[in-house]
């Protein structure tokens, strides 16, 4: 894929043209207040203790949007487990198996891996439905898109904020870290924005759901392409759909982030256009850095993992 977006120098200055909805903070505060009022205490069930020792793995059930049960893995290292990282998953995937998430626990960090409701039917498996019996191989970008209260990603952002609630209980109230790639990167930004002072570090790799109104006109592939495909025929819904998307746009929510952030972007990314990643990055006012990979697409170079670990060790140390 060639460089198809604006020049890098222009992206470093680019700001989204999407207007923030009036009263966005209050609107999200009401969503979270309602979800917390419906929440039940999280349940932790030991999972395969002989397989994972000396680590401890728990199958978690916690309440998300609408009081719905959301599944997660909690992987606890030996000794002190007060440093908790919440991990979010990319589009189409679910929490998978605990074996997919063992690096940080091996380094002393506890990890809470949130399942993505109504996904988990593609590249790794899930365990949480979205008004259905279980995970799906589904396309969710247009689900409930006519109203922000009913939109799929309103529910998932709420799930992400309540996952941080669970992590804060596990950490004894100490700030936590969030991380993810693609959709997971967007959820990490959203969680950091909705929890502000409770999130110390945010790692978001090629984050999805940023500057969405630009992305749906630029990205040639799904998931963004699902929206113009839907609106091409449902023309009467265009205005309401674009209004809804403003409530879950991480380029707008990013203005609230106080965590120390490390993002990454591939300039040949044709899933999450690089200018949309910069649209979110440029709105973050706190301590931040971005890794720019000129010849990478929608994947993170393995070398970036060490940069992330160094950043985590410096800003969220264990021991």
Image (spheres, rainbow, N blue to C red):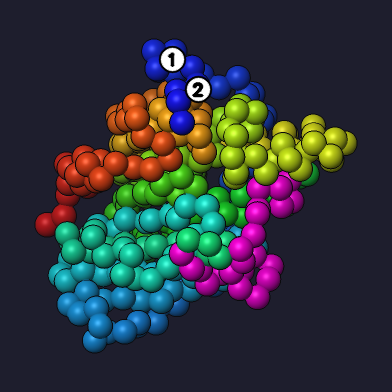
**Residue lying furthest right in this view?**
236
Residue farthest to the bottom, as pictured: 50
What quarter of the picture does the C terminus occupy? bottom left
291, above or below 312, in the image = above
- State the image coordinates of residue 14 (x, y, percent, origin top left): 48, 17
How many marks are shown on the rendered structure? 2
Q: Is residue 247 magenta?
A: no
Residue 18: quadrant of the picture: top right
Most common SS among magenta residues: loop
282 or 37, which lies in front?
282
Q: Position of residue 28 (x, y in %)?
A: 60, 44
Please indicate, yes or no, whether residue 4 appears anywhere in the rendered image: yes
Q: At numbered mark 1, what does the secondary structure look like: helix, strand or loop?
A: loop
The residue carrying pointer 1 sits among few (fewer than 14), some (14 to 19) or many (20 or more) residues within 10 Å by Cα, namely few
Q: Nearer the viewer, residue 36 or 130?
A: 130
**Residue in the picture at 37% in, 63% down:** 112
- Mark 2 lies on residue: 4
Q: Is residue 303 above or below residue 108?
A: above
> What range of the chain is rendered magenta?
124-145
Residue at 16% from the left image edge and 55% from the top image edge: 318
The numbered dot on residue 275 is none
Label 2 to label 1: alpha-carbon separation: 9 Å
Pointer 1 residue: 7
Magenta stretch contains residue 127: yes
Left/right placement of residue 136 relative to residue 169 reads right
Along the horizontal axis of the image, is 112 left or right of 116? left
On the image, the x and y values in percent for residue 248 come to 60, 40
């Amino acid at each position: 894929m060639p460089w198809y977006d604006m020049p890098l120098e222009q992206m470093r200055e680019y700001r989204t043209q999407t207007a923030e909805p009036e009263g966005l903070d209050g609107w999200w505060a009401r969503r979270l207040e309602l979800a917390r009022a419906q929440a039940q205490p999280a349940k932790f069930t030991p999972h395969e203790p002989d397989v994972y020792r000396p680590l401890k793995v728990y199958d978690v059930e916690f309440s998300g949007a609408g009081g719905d049960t959301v599944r997660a893995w909690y992987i606890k290292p030996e000794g002190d487990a007060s440093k908790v990282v919440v991990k979010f998953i990319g589009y189409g995937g679910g929490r998978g198996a605990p074996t997919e998430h063992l690096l940080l626990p091996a380094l002393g960090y506890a990890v809470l891996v949130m399942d993505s409701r109504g996904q988990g039917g593609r590249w790794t498996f899930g365990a949480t439905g979205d008004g259905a019996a279980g995970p799906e191989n589904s396309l969710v970008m247009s689900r409930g898109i006519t109203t922000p209260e009913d939109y799929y990603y309103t529910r998932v952002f709420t799930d992400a904020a309540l996952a941080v609630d669970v992590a804060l209980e596990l950490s004894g109230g100490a700030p936590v870290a969030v991380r993810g790639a693609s959709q997971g990167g967007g959820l990490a930004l959203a969680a950091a924005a909705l929890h502000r002072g409770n999130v110390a570090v945010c790692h978001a790799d090629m984050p999805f759901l940023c500057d969405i109104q630009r992305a749906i006109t630029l990205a040639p592939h799904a998931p963004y392409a699902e929206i113009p495909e839907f609106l091409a025929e449902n023309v009467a819904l265009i205005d309401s759909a674009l209004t809804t998307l403003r409530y879950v746009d991480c380029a707008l929510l990013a203005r609230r982030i106080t965590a120390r952030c490390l993002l990454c972007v591939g300039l040949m990314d044709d899933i999450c256009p690089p200018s949309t990643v910069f649209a979110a990055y440029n709105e973050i006012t706190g301590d931040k850095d971005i890794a720019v990979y000129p010849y990478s697409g929608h994947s993170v170079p393995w070398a970036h993992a060490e940069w992330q670990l160094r950043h985590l060790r410096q800003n969220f140390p264990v021991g």
